[in-house]
Amino acid sequence: MSENNHADFGLWKDWRLHGLVLITVIITELIGTFRIPVGPGVILLLPMLYSLIIGLILYFTPLVKEKQSKSAEPIIVLGVALLLAKIGVVIGPSLPDVIAAGPALVLQELGNLGTIFLALPIALWLGMKREAIGMTHSIGREPNVGLIMDKFGISSPEGRGVMAMYIFGTVFGAAFLGLISGLLATITPLSPLSFAMASGVGSGSMMAAASGSLVAAFPEIEDQILAFAGASNLLSLSTGLWVSIFIGLPLTEKIYSWMTRKKGEV
């Protein structure tokens, strides 16, 4: 017990870690957000993206030692807890808006489960083990990171998988959705409002990139696009975690067990 208290006290005294984080935050906020039009789409470069890049660069410099990298692990858990609390505060007052959005927005959450049947077999085919469970049970945003941390731990294979997906989604997710939403909305006969609903995957940066691309392509219905995207994203935040707890994660574990058992028999 005394060793744990000593370690925790050492974490808060690690001024190098806190100083590097503070400097990184200041730099990224000063840079701000950039919008890059690419054909019908818009790529949003957000401060969160810059901070990840700067953090990766710092990791390979003498400024960050093994002590700082280990000290940063429990802070991730704390950060996720704060984000979950913020999400809970946002959901409550907005429940009437979610109810008014209609059954289509409720059913759209089930569509996210379809990716399990595609992503998990590919992950196993690429040679991944239990990391695939953390990577493929959901889109891997903050609530899902918290779920995997709570059940398996941050240092588990599942924890490494969900964190890899979280980082990958942060770096590439917004750019991908920003491009694909505007492109598909302009080349398919589907209503742009359907793509606005689809952009609400539970990530603020991804929703902003996707809806920004749609607004650039269809400025005459900007208010409707933003309303549908916002309601969809709010619903994904409020119901997505429950869907992951009761359906997504158990389903992924079941399919993983079945596929690895079949693979072992061969």
Image (cartoon, grey):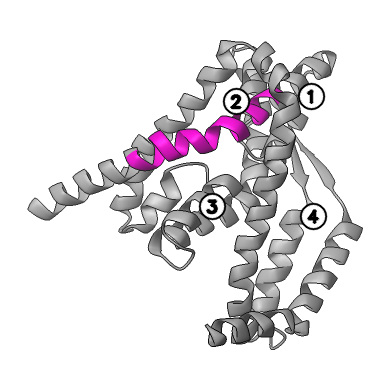
Quarter-of-image position of residue 119: top left
Circle 2 SS class = helix
Q: Disc 1 and disc 3: Cα gap in Å?
A: 30 Å
Left or right placement of residue 220 versus residue 178 in this view: right
Circle 4 SS class = helix
Q: Amino acid at mark 1?
A: Val
Query: Mark 2 against mark 1, which lies toward the viewer?
Result: 2
Q: Amino acid at mark 4?
A: Pro
Q: Is residue 211 above or below residue 151?
A: above
Q: Mark 1 or 3 closer to N-term?
A: 3
- Specify the segment rendered in magenta: 231-250
Q: Amino acid at mark 2?
A: Ala
Q: Disc 4 and disc 2: Cα gap in Å?
A: 24 Å
Q: Disc 1 and disc 4: Cα gap in Å?
A: 21 Å
Q: Position of residue 120 (x, y in %)?
A: 35, 44
Number of other residues with Cα within 10 Å of mark 3, as a class: few under 14, some 14 to 19, many 20 or more: many
Label 1: which residue? 215
Left or right placement of residue 114 versus residue 76 in this view: left
Which residue is found at the position 64% from the left and 54% from the top? 81
Q: Amino acid at mark 3?
A: Val
